[in-house]
Image (cartoon, rainbow, N blue to C red):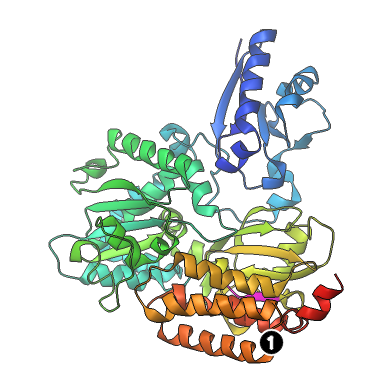
Amino acid sequence: MTPVRIFVPQDAAAASVGADAVARALAHEAAARGLAFDIVRTGARGMMWLEPLVEVETHGGRIAYGPVGAGDVAGLVDAGFHAGGAHRLRLGAIEDLDWMKRQSRLVFARCGVQHPLSLDDWRARGGLAGLKRALEMGPEAIVDAIQASGLRGRGGAGFPAGVKWATVRDAEADRKYVVCNADEGDSGTFADRMLMEGDPFQIVEGMIVAGLAVGATKGFVYVRSEYPRAFRAMTQAIARAQQAGLLGDDVLGSRRAFRIEVRLGAGAYICGEEMALIESLEGKRGMVRAKPPLPAVSGLFGRPTLVHNVLTLAAVPFILAHGADAYAAYGVGRSRGTMPIQLAGNVKRGGLIEAGFGLSLREIVEDFGGGTLSGRPVRAVQLGGPLGAYLPETALDVKFDYESLSAVGGMLGHGGIVVFDDSVDMARQARFAFAFCARESCGKCTPCRIGAVRGLETMDRIIAGENVEANIALVRDLGALMSEASLCAMGGLTPAPVLSALRHFGVDFRARRTREAGS
């Protein structure tokens, strides 16, 4: 009897809503009924509202069912789902769903499709093509391709990746490093985790290509402590890559060396900042270093270091395999390629969307997201994590790209969008920004360390209705000071959500006593 392949995600998000129990129930039903099921644990497709999402390999292709609970499994087997049978949870082929058809999946093409730790699956779906091409091209041509692609850092600042690569390549040193910043801590973001758990070899491949291009022989992946599944997946993927000759002293017989280590953070948000991350990698407390020098000149252990986040490095294999022009064909203006957009908060269809830059926020929130889960009107969206600006519903027609968002005071950041309905209290959201910074600041610079605490105290007075206008003026002054004088983006960006909430939702700050007395 040929086993039926059934795909069940082991992604952390799917596991949190019962995917592991579903896999166990499937195994139990197969044993009880004498059926042959080959249960393949995959990453997630990104359709979080449908998790756990189960797919079955049939003669007509893969058929999806979801969301599936462990209690649904017996009924699914009764309905012959393992042959694509009809059932109320049947979705059909994922590729035929409008939500997926409207995307351009370059970085996440294999995520949720393959076994994450199968090198055979990975190679069969295009893995290794970028690295093989890179070995044929040589360092100069690789850097030229990255520059021509228009790839920009996907961690927040959007700095041109090719410029950073050229700087590290041209730096003179006895050793160089590649660091993958997987300390994904922004609210509403989960793309790094999804990729580490669903396609870890792609990150490994991107890091090797980067090492070949800039002359580095060692790489580090810095994973946040809250991601144990991702940490295990990366650790296992690196071990398997080394056994297969992708890593080590002789990468694919090229006589070029590259090794990777995975390091686990200790829960500090500030270690998402590249200099604090480097301090942590060196075994020190995660604290920000003053710039210059930049890491590309003097980074890890004082050597030239290429620091990128997961999504930046994961885009590299496609660029090398298909060419810079193929990647640059997506997007608009100076925002080239695709962006994994993570939609969260009060939204009906939360998940990960990968598309070329240029979608409007309205298309993302209303068409892909289906509006709010509560059914109430959208009032605000926050982009760029807990330190990103809030934009009102009237700004939803703005395009999702670096320049368009910057023009309206927004920040693309790591691609996270958190949705709020009209019940949100924006004064309390502003308070949260100060509270978050006060808790997560490394404490090295006074504007951030003291400014966040004073801001939190001042917001508490505003919320209590005390000298509201005077305290609003003080918040504005604190915002200007923190923005201009903080050592890093932690303190520098904390005022962004506060001041944007004041600008767009001032009524929430000025009507405290009246509104709360009548509530």
Range shown magenta: 387-391
In this image, 55 relative to 261: left or right? right
- For label 1, the residue is 468
Q: Residue at x 75, y 68 (%)?
A: 424
Residue 4 in magenta stretch: no
Residue 388 in magenta stretch: yes
Q: Residue at x 36, y 39 (%)?
A: 235
Q: Is residue 69 above or below residue 321?
A: above
Snapshot quadrant of residue 502: bottom right
Answer yes or no: is residue 52 visible.
yes
Residue 482 position within the rendered picture, expressed as x and y whole percent measured from the top left: 47, 83
Residue 490 position within the rendered picture, expressed as x and y whole percent measured from the top left: 45, 72
Answer yes or no: is residue 154 visible.
no
Snapshot quadrant of residue 301: bottom left
Give 301 or 304, whichever is nearer the viewer. 301
Give 391 or 203, whichever is nearer the viewer. 391
Residue 269 position within the rendered picture, expressed as x and y whole percent measured from the top left: 45, 61
Residue 351 position within the rendered picture, expressed as x and y whole percent measured from the top left: 65, 52
**How many numbered marks have been drawn onto this rendered protein structure?**
1
